[in-house]
Image: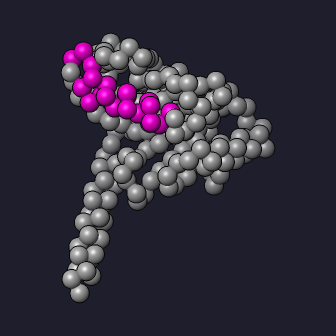
Amino acid sequence: MKVLYILGTLSIIYFVFQSFISINALKTEKQKFRVVFKDAELEIRYYPAATMATIYSESTNYKGVANNGFRKLAGFIFGGNKEKQGISMTAPVRMNMSEKGSEMSFVMPDKYDEHNLPKPNDASIHIHQSTPQYAAVISFSGYATDEKITSYKNKLTDILNSRKIKILGAYNFLGYNAPYQFIGRTNEISIPVEWKE
Protein backbone atom coordinates (compact mmCIF):
# COMPACT_ATOMS: atom_id res chain seq x y z
CA MET A 1 0.00 0.00 0.00
CA LYS A 2 2.84 2.35 0.91
CA VAL A 3 4.54 1.65 -2.45
CA LEU A 4 1.33 2.53 -4.32
CA TYR A 5 1.06 5.76 -2.35
CA ILE A 6 4.67 6.70 -3.20
CA LEU A 7 4.16 5.84 -6.88
CA GLY A 8 0.94 7.85 -6.97
CA THR A 9 2.64 10.85 -5.36
CA LEU A 10 5.59 10.64 -7.79
CA SER A 11 3.19 10.43 -10.74
CA ILE A 12 1.36 13.55 -9.60
CA ILE A 13 4.66 15.43 -9.14
CA TYR A 14 5.79 14.31 -12.61
CA PHE A 15 2.60 15.47 -14.34
CA VAL A 16 2.56 18.78 -12.45
CA PHE A 17 6.20 19.39 -13.45
CA GLN A 18 5.55 18.49 -17.10
CA SER A 19 2.44 20.70 -17.16
CA PHE A 20 4.48 23.60 -15.76
CA ILE A 21 7.18 23.06 -18.42
CA SER A 22 4.55 22.89 -21.20
CA ILE A 23 2.90 26.13 -20.02
CA ASN A 24 6.29 27.86 -19.89
CA ALA A 25 7.02 26.66 -23.44
CA LEU A 26 3.79 28.31 -24.61
CA LYS A 27 4.90 31.60 -23.03
CA THR A 28 8.35 31.53 -24.66
CA GLU A 29 8.85 34.20 -27.33
CA LYS A 30 8.81 32.60 -30.80
CA GLN A 31 10.55 33.69 -33.97
CA LYS A 32 8.18 35.88 -35.97
CA PHE A 33 6.67 34.54 -39.20
CA ARG A 34 3.54 34.86 -41.31
CA VAL A 35 1.72 31.85 -42.77
CA VAL A 36 1.06 32.43 -46.48
CA PHE A 37 -0.21 28.95 -47.39
CA LYS A 38 -1.29 25.87 -45.48
CA ASP A 39 -2.79 22.47 -46.27
CA ALA A 40 -2.71 18.93 -44.84
CA GLU A 41 0.89 18.30 -45.97
CA LEU A 42 2.83 21.48 -45.33
CA GLU A 43 2.87 25.14 -44.43
CA ILE A 44 4.56 27.97 -46.33
CA ARG A 45 5.78 30.79 -44.08
CA TYR A 46 7.36 34.17 -44.62
CA TYR A 47 10.15 34.83 -42.12
CA PRO A 48 11.30 38.46 -41.82
CA ALA A 49 14.91 39.21 -40.83
CA ALA A 50 15.79 38.29 -37.24
CA THR A 51 18.87 38.73 -35.07
CA MET A 52 20.68 35.42 -34.59
CA ALA A 53 23.50 34.12 -32.43
CA THR A 54 25.15 31.31 -34.37
CA ILE A 55 27.85 28.77 -33.62
CA TYR A 56 29.57 26.81 -36.39
CA SER A 57 30.63 23.21 -35.90
CA GLU A 58 32.48 20.47 -37.76
CA SER A 59 29.83 18.01 -36.55
CA THR A 60 27.69 16.57 -39.31
CA ASN A 61 24.85 15.11 -37.25
CA TYR A 62 22.15 16.25 -34.86
CA LYS A 63 23.72 14.87 -31.69
CA GLY A 64 27.10 16.50 -32.33
CA VAL A 65 25.62 19.90 -33.17
CA ALA A 66 23.12 19.80 -30.30
CA ASN A 67 25.68 18.96 -27.62
CA ASN A 68 28.45 21.37 -28.63
CA GLY A 69 26.40 24.28 -29.94
CA PHE A 70 23.75 24.41 -27.25
CA ARG A 71 26.25 24.59 -24.40
CA LYS A 72 28.09 27.58 -25.93
CA LEU A 73 24.97 29.50 -26.96
CA ALA A 74 23.29 28.86 -23.60
CA GLY A 75 26.41 30.21 -21.88
CA PHE A 76 26.11 33.40 -23.94
CA ILE A 77 22.47 34.10 -23.06
CA PHE A 78 22.92 33.10 -19.40
CA GLY A 79 25.43 35.92 -18.84
CA GLY A 80 28.47 34.91 -20.87
CA ASN A 81 28.69 38.31 -22.54
CA LYS A 82 30.52 41.61 -22.05
CA GLU A 83 27.60 43.12 -20.11
CA LYS A 84 27.08 39.94 -17.99
CA GLN A 85 23.42 40.29 -18.95
CA GLY A 86 20.86 37.51 -19.09
CA ILE A 87 19.02 37.20 -22.41
CA SER A 88 15.65 35.43 -22.56
CA MET A 89 15.54 32.08 -24.32
CA THR A 90 13.35 32.02 -27.42
CA ALA A 91 12.13 29.29 -29.75
CA PRO A 92 12.93 27.59 -31.96
CA VAL A 93 16.56 26.59 -31.75
CA ARG A 94 17.61 26.36 -35.41
CA MET A 95 20.08 23.79 -36.75
CA ASN A 96 21.51 23.39 -40.21
CA MET A 97 23.44 20.16 -40.86
CA SER A 98 25.45 19.05 -43.88
CA GLU A 99 28.40 16.84 -44.77
CA LYS A 100 30.64 19.93 -44.72
CA GLY A 101 29.69 20.95 -41.16
CA SER A 102 26.82 22.42 -39.25
CA GLU A 103 25.54 25.44 -37.42
CA MET A 104 23.17 26.09 -34.55
CA SER A 105 21.39 29.40 -34.03
CA PHE A 106 19.45 30.93 -31.16
CA VAL A 107 16.96 33.55 -32.36
CA MET A 108 17.42 36.63 -30.22
CA PRO A 109 14.39 38.29 -28.57
CA ASP A 110 12.65 40.80 -30.83
CA LYS A 111 13.87 43.80 -28.79
CA TYR A 112 17.49 43.15 -29.80
CA ASP A 113 19.39 43.88 -32.99
CA GLU A 114 23.08 43.71 -33.87
CA HIS A 115 23.68 47.10 -32.22
CA ASN A 116 22.06 46.68 -28.80
CA LEU A 117 22.65 42.95 -28.22
CA PRO A 118 25.33 42.23 -25.57
CA LYS A 119 28.57 41.03 -27.18
CA PRO A 120 29.40 37.36 -26.49
CA ASN A 121 32.56 36.52 -24.56
CA ASP A 122 33.04 33.50 -26.82
CA ALA A 123 34.49 34.75 -30.11
CA SER A 124 33.18 31.69 -31.95
CA ILE A 125 29.59 32.96 -31.53
CA HIS A 126 28.61 34.98 -34.61
CA ILE A 127 25.90 37.66 -34.26
CA HIS A 128 24.10 38.46 -37.51
CA GLN A 129 20.80 39.26 -39.21
CA SER A 130 19.08 36.42 -41.01
CA THR A 131 17.95 36.92 -44.59
CA PRO A 132 14.15 37.32 -45.04
CA GLN A 133 12.79 34.22 -46.74
CA TYR A 134 9.83 32.02 -47.58
CA ALA A 135 10.12 28.52 -46.17
CA ALA A 136 8.14 25.30 -46.47
CA VAL A 137 7.64 23.61 -43.09
CA ILE A 138 6.43 20.25 -41.77
CA SER A 139 6.31 19.19 -38.13
CA PHE A 140 6.76 16.04 -36.07
CA SER A 141 6.47 15.21 -32.38
CA GLY A 142 8.60 13.43 -29.81
CA TYR A 143 12.36 13.59 -29.44
CA ALA A 144 14.40 14.35 -32.55
CA THR A 145 16.97 11.89 -33.90
CA ASP A 146 19.13 11.97 -37.01
CA GLU A 147 16.89 9.27 -38.52
CA LYS A 148 13.69 11.25 -37.90
CA ILE A 149 15.22 14.49 -39.16
CA THR A 150 16.42 12.82 -42.37
CA SER A 151 13.09 11.08 -42.89
CA TYR A 152 11.02 14.27 -42.55
CA LYS A 153 13.51 16.30 -44.60
CA ASN A 154 13.18 13.72 -47.41
CA LYS A 155 9.40 13.75 -47.05
CA LEU A 156 9.22 17.55 -47.35
CA THR A 157 11.66 17.55 -50.28
CA ASP A 158 9.50 14.97 -52.10
CA ILE A 159 6.35 17.05 -51.50
CA LEU A 160 8.02 20.19 -52.84
CA ASN A 161 9.39 18.39 -55.89
CA SER A 162 6.01 16.82 -56.63
CA ARG A 163 4.39 20.28 -56.51
CA LYS A 164 7.21 21.84 -58.56
CA ILE A 165 7.99 24.32 -55.77
CA LYS A 166 11.58 25.51 -56.23
CA ILE A 167 13.94 24.79 -53.33
CA LEU A 168 16.37 27.65 -52.69
CA GLY A 169 18.72 26.26 -50.04
CA ALA A 170 19.57 23.74 -47.35
CA TYR A 171 17.05 22.52 -44.80
CA ASN A 172 16.89 23.55 -41.13
CA PHE A 173 15.77 21.55 -38.13
CA LEU A 174 13.73 23.66 -35.67
CA GLY A 175 13.45 22.48 -32.06
CA TYR A 176 10.97 24.10 -29.71
CA ASN A 177 11.32 22.33 -26.36
CA ALA A 178 13.75 21.94 -23.46
CA PRO A 179 15.39 18.48 -23.22
CA TYR A 180 13.48 17.71 -19.98
CA GLN A 181 10.05 18.38 -21.52
CA PHE A 182 8.65 14.93 -22.30
CA ILE A 183 5.05 15.83 -23.18
CA GLY A 184 3.89 17.96 -26.11
CA ARG A 185 7.21 18.20 -27.93
CA THR A 186 7.25 20.00 -31.30
CA ASN A 187 9.90 19.76 -34.01
CA GLU A 188 9.91 21.14 -37.55
CA ILE A 189 11.83 20.79 -40.78
CA SER A 190 12.11 24.03 -42.76
CA ILE A 191 13.32 24.42 -46.37
CA PRO A 192 13.68 27.83 -48.08
CA VAL A 193 11.59 28.04 -51.23
CA GLU A 194 10.61 30.37 -54.03
CA TRP A 195 7.09 31.69 -53.40
CA LYS A 196 5.01 34.48 -54.82
CA GLU A 197 2.08 35.94 -52.88
Q: Is residue 51 left or right of residue 151?
A: left
Answer yes or no: is residue 38 visible.
Answer: no
Query: In the image, what residue occupies the spot 70% across and 31% down?
Result: 167
Residue 156: % across, % down: 67, 44
Task: Characterize the magenta stretch by its predominant secondary structure.
Answer: helix
**Along the viewing direction, whichever of 9 and 91 lies nearer the viewer:** 9
**Along the viewing direction, whichever of 37 and 113 lies nearer the viewer:** 113
Q: Is residue 63 left or right of residue 182?
A: right
Q: Quadrant of the N terminus?
A: bottom left
Residue 90: % across, % down: 36, 36
Answer yes or no: is residue 161 visible.
Answer: yes
Which quarter of the picture shows residue 172? top right
Q: How is the image coloured?
A: one colour
Query: In the image, what residue occupies the spot 25% across and 80% down?
Result: 3
Which quarter of the picture shows residue 81? top left
Q: Is the residue 54 above or below the residue 74 in the image?
A: above
Q: Quadrant of the C terminus?
A: top right
Which quarter of the picture shows residue 16? bottom left
* Badge count: 0
Query: In the image, what residue occupies the spot 59% across and 25% down?
Result: 101
Q: Is the residue 50 above or below the residue 151 in the image?
A: above
Residue 155: % across, % down: 69, 47
Q: Is residue 72 magenta?
A: yes
**Along the viewing direction, whichever of 188 and 38 lies nearer the viewer:** 188
Query: In the image, what residue occupies the spot 70% across and 44% down?
Result: 154
Report the magenta residues as a range: 65-83
Q: Is residue 169 magenta?
A: no
